[in-house]
Image (cartoon, rainbow, N blue to C red):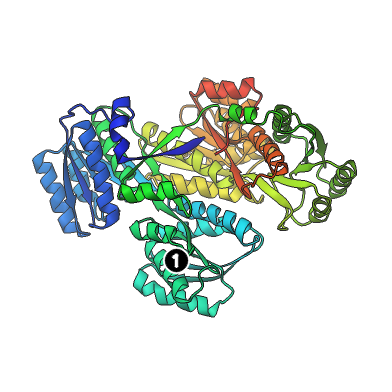
C-alpha cells in the first residue's frame, strides 16, 4: 500500500543528496511553466515548478495567460520562437487551446499538462491532475469517524456545492457516498455557494431553515469559509461542526481556533503538482517514459494535527508530498499481535464456500495464530435460519467476538443484535447490516477501485501500444449491487483518452454463458481491439472469445478478479490478457480479525475500512508468481 510521507521544502536539500528527486546537475533545458490566473493555488504550482527546475539546473520561464485564449496563443508562439524545450501548462480550454499547443508539439516541444488538459490525443506527454472525488471521500471518511465518535453516529448535514463547475460534482458525490454509509446520517440541504461573501447568507439561511443541522460541509474554499462564519454568527459553536475542501492560511487559523467549529479540510497539493509536472518534462526530454495520467495527492488537515497544519503554515503551503511504498507491513502487524489473542475465542463466519471466502477465512486463521486466539470457523450456507442458529450457538458458547459477512442487510439484524446485547463484539466484512451500533467495524472492497485501477492500466496500454486509440467492448454484471461502480470507474477512467470509443456493453458474468455473448460482440464489432469485464467469469469469457476468434495480437483483454486461471492467462504467450484488478480476500480476513482483537482490548476502530485492491499486470511475474505460490493468500498491508 501507498502512504503519504510529508516533507517541507526545507527537506529538499536532503532529498537531493539522497537522489530522491531530480538530479541537481545542470540539465541545460529551458522550460516554460504557464498558469491561467494568479491566485494562491497557481502561484504555489509555479513555486513547485521552480523548485524542480532549480534541482535539475533547468531554466524556467514563468507565464500567465490571464484566462485569455489570445494571450495564451501569443505566449506559446513566443515560446516556439525562443526554442524552449518543454511547456508545462494548464490550458484554458480543452478545445480552444489545441491549435497553439499542436503547433508547439510540431515544433518539437514537449508538452506536459497539469490541472487541465486538451481534448486532443498525442499533444501532452503527461497530465497531472487532482482526482476531485478524492477530495470528497477523504473528508467524508473523517466526517464518518467524527460522527461516530463524537455525535453518537447521528448527523443532520447541510452542504454548500459548486456544482456548476466541472470538477465540483465528483467532490460532492465522494463525500455523500462516504457519509451515507452511516445509517444515522441525513442530508437535509444542498445549496450552491462557493464565493465566501455570497455563500455566507446562504449558509446562514440553511441553518435557520434546518435548526437540527449539526454538520456542514462545502465543496470548495469559499463555501467552507462561509460555513464556519455562519456557525460563528449564529452562536452555534459546539453544536454545529464544519468539514470542507481546500486549504489556505485562513483554514489553518480556523482549524486551530478554540471555537472547535472547523474539524477538517482536504486540500490539493499544488506545490507537488508543479514539482512533479516539471520533473516529468525533464524525464521525457531525457528520453524516459512517464505515466500518461497521474492523480496528484490530496492531503487531509484535521483539527488537532498541529504538526501538519504548522508545516503548511510555515512552508506557506509549499509542502512536498512524496508517495512511498511501505513493504512488509503485514509482517509488522503480525509481530504487534503477539500474545494479544491469548484467552480470546472468535467466530469467523462466511456465507458460502468458494475460493474467495475460503481465502478470507485463511486470513482470519493467520491473524488468530499470530495473536494466539482460538478461531471457530462457520458457514451459513446463504441461509438465514442457518446463520441465526450459528450465532445462537456462539452466544451459548460465550465467544468474545464474531467476524461475519451477513447474508442480509436487514434479515441478519435480529440475530446479530442478540449477540451484541450478549456482550459479543461484531466485526463485518464484505457485507454488513442496516442497523447502527451493531458492528464495531466494517471491512469492504471499494468496488469502484476495481474499475478505476484497471482503467488506469488500460489507459497506459492504449497510449503506449495502440497509438492512443481503442474501440472497447464490455461484459457487465450490473444486476448485482457491487458491479455498476466497477464499470463506472473503468469507463470514467478510460474515457479521459480522446481516442477511446465504447461500442458494446453486454451482460455476462458466468464464463460459460458469457462466452457466446463475447463472441457475438466481436463478430458484430470487428473494429473492437480492447475487451473488459466486470468480474472473473466475464474476463475468462473475453479471453476465450479472443482465442476462439483467432484474434490474439489484435484484441487485448483487461478484467476483474484474480485466480489461478487468470495467472495462467497473464503469463500465456498469446499476449491476450493484459491485466486484472483483484480484491485481497486474505487481507480482508486478516484485518477484520485483527480489528476484533483490538476492539476487545479497548482500542477505537475506524467504522469503515476499504480493503486494498491489487493490480496484476502482464510482465509482473514476481507479483503473479507470489499469488500462485501463496494460492492467493497474500498479505498486502492496510493503509
Q: Determine whether 346 is above or below 268 in the image.
A: above
Q: Percent from the top left, x then y, of residue 531?
A: 52, 38
Could you tell me if residue 120 is visible in this image?
no
Q: Which residue is mark 1?
A: 161
Could you tell me if residue 632 is visible in this image?
yes
Return the residue nearer the eye: 339 or 102: 339
Quarter of the image holding residue 183? bottom right
- Left or right side of 157 for 272: left
Return the residue nearer the eye: 337 or 219: 337
Q: Determine whether 444 is above or below 637 in the image.
A: below
Spot the residue most to the left: 81
Q: Percent from the top left, x then y, of residue 349?
A: 78, 40
Q: Determine whether 236 is above or below 177 in the image.
A: below
Return the residue nearer the eye: 142 or 249: 249
- Residue at x 31% of width, y 30% of height: 14
Dot 1 lies on which element? strand
Amino acid at each position: 500500500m501507498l502512504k503519504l510521507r510529508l516533507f517541507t521544502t526545507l527537506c529538499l536539500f536532503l532529498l537531493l543528496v539522497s537522489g530522491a528527486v531530480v538530479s541537481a546537475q545542470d540539465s541545460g533545458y529551458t522550460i516554460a511553466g504557464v498558469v491561467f490566473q494568479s491566485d494562491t493555488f497557481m502561484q504555489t504550482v509555479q513555486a513547485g515548478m521552480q523548485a524542480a527546475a532549480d534541482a535539475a539546473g533547468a531554466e524556467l520561464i514563468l507565464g500567465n495567460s490571464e484566462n485569455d485564449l489570445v494571450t495564451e496563443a501569443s505566449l506559446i508562439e513566443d515560446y516556439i520562437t525562443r526554442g524552449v524545450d518543454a511547456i508545462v501548462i494548464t490550458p484554458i480550454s480543452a478545445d480552444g487551446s489545441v491549435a497553439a499547443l499542436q503547433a508547439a508539439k510540431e515544433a518539437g516541444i514537449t508538452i506536459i499538462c497539469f490541472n487541465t488538459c486538451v481534448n486532443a490525443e498525442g499533444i501532452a506527454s503527461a497530465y497531472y491532475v487532482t482526482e476531485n472525488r478524492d477530495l470528497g471521500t477523504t473528508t467524508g471518511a473523517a466526517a464518518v469517524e467524527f460522527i461516530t465518535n463524537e455525535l453518537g453516529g447521528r448527523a443532520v448535514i447541510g452542504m454548500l456545492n459548486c456544482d456548476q463547475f466541472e470538477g465540483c460534482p465528483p467532490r460532492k458525490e465522494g463525500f455523500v457516498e462516504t457519509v451515507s454509509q452511516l445509517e444515522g446520517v441525513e442530508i437535509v440541504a444542498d445549496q450552491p455557494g462557493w464565493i465566501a461573501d455570497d455563500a455566507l447568507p446562504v449558509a446562514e439561511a440553511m441553518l435557520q431553515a434546518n435548526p437540527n443541522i449539526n454538520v456542514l460541509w462545502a465543496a470548495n474554499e469559499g463555501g467552507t469559509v462561509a460555513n464556519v462564519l455562519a456557525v460563528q454568527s449564529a452562536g452555534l459553536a459546539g453544536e454545529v461542526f464544519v468539514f470542507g475542501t481546500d486549504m489556505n492560511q485562513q483554514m489553518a487559523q480556523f482549524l486551530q481556533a478554540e471555537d472547535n467549529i472547523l474539524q477538517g479540510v482536504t486540500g490539493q497539493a499544488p506545490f507537488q503538482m508543479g514539482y512533479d509536472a516539471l520533473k516529468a518534462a525533464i524525464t521525457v526530454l531525457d528520453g524516459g517514459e512517464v505515466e500518461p495520467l497521474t492523480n496528484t495527492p490530496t492531503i487531509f488537515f484535521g483539527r488537532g494535527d498541529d504538526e501538519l497544519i504548522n508545516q503548511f503554515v510555515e512552508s506557506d503551503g509549499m509542502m512536498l508530498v512524496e508517495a512511498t511504498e511501505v513493504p512488509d507491513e503485514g509482517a509488522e502487524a503480525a509481530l504487534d499481535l503477539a500474545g494479544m489473542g491469548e484467552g480470546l475465542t472468535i467466530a469467523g463466519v462466511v456465507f458460502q464456500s468458494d475460493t474467495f471466502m475460503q481465502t478470507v477465512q485463511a486470513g482470519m486463521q493467520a491473524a488468530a495464530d499470530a495473536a494466539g486466539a482460538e478461531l471457530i470457523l462457520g458457514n451459513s450456507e446463504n441461509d438465514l435460519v442457518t446463520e441465526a442458529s450459528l450465532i445462537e450457538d456462539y452466544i451459548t458458547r460465550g465467544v468474545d467476538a464474531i467476524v461475519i459477512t451477513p447474508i442480509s442487510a436487514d434479515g441478519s439484524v435480529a440475530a446479530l443484535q442478540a449477540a451484541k446485547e450478549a456482550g459479543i463484539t461484531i466485526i463485518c466484512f464484505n457485507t454488513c447490516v442496516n442497523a447502527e451500533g451493531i458492528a464495531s467495524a466494517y471491512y469492504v472492497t471499494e468496488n469502484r477501485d476495481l474499475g478505476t485501477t484497471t482503467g488506469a492500466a488500460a489507459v497506459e496500454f492504449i497510449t503506449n501500444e495502440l497509438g492512443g486509440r481503442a474501440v472497447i467492448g464490455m461484459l457487465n454484471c450490473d444486476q448485482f449491487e457491487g458491479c455498476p461502480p466497477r464499470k463506472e470507474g473503468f469507463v470514467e477512467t478510460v474515457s479521459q483518452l480522446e481516442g477511446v470509443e465504447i461500442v458494446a456493453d453486454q451482460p455476462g458474468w458466468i464464463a460459460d454463458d458469457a462466452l457466446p455473448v463475447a463472441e457475438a460482440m466481436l463478430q458484430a464489432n470487428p473494429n473492437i481491439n480492447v475487451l473488459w469485464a466486470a468480474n472473473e467469469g466475464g474476463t475468462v469469457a473475453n479471453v476465450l472469445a479472443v482465442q476462439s476468434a483467432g484474434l490474439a495480437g489484435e484484441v487485448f483483454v483487461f478484467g476483474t478478479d484474480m485466480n489461478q486461471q487468470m495467472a495462467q492467462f497473464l503469463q500465456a504467450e498469446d499476449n491476450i490478457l493484459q491485466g486484472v484488478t483483484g480484491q485481497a480476500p486474505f487481507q480482508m480476513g486478516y484485518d477484520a480479525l485483527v480489528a476484533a482483537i483490538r476492539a476487545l482490548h479497548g482500542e477505537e476502530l475506524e467504522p469503515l475500512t476499504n480493503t486494498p485492491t491489487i493490480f496484476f499486470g502482464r510482465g509482473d511475474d514476481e507479483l503473479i508468481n507470489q499469488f500462485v505460490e501463496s494460492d492467493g493468500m497474500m498479505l498486502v498491508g492496510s493503509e
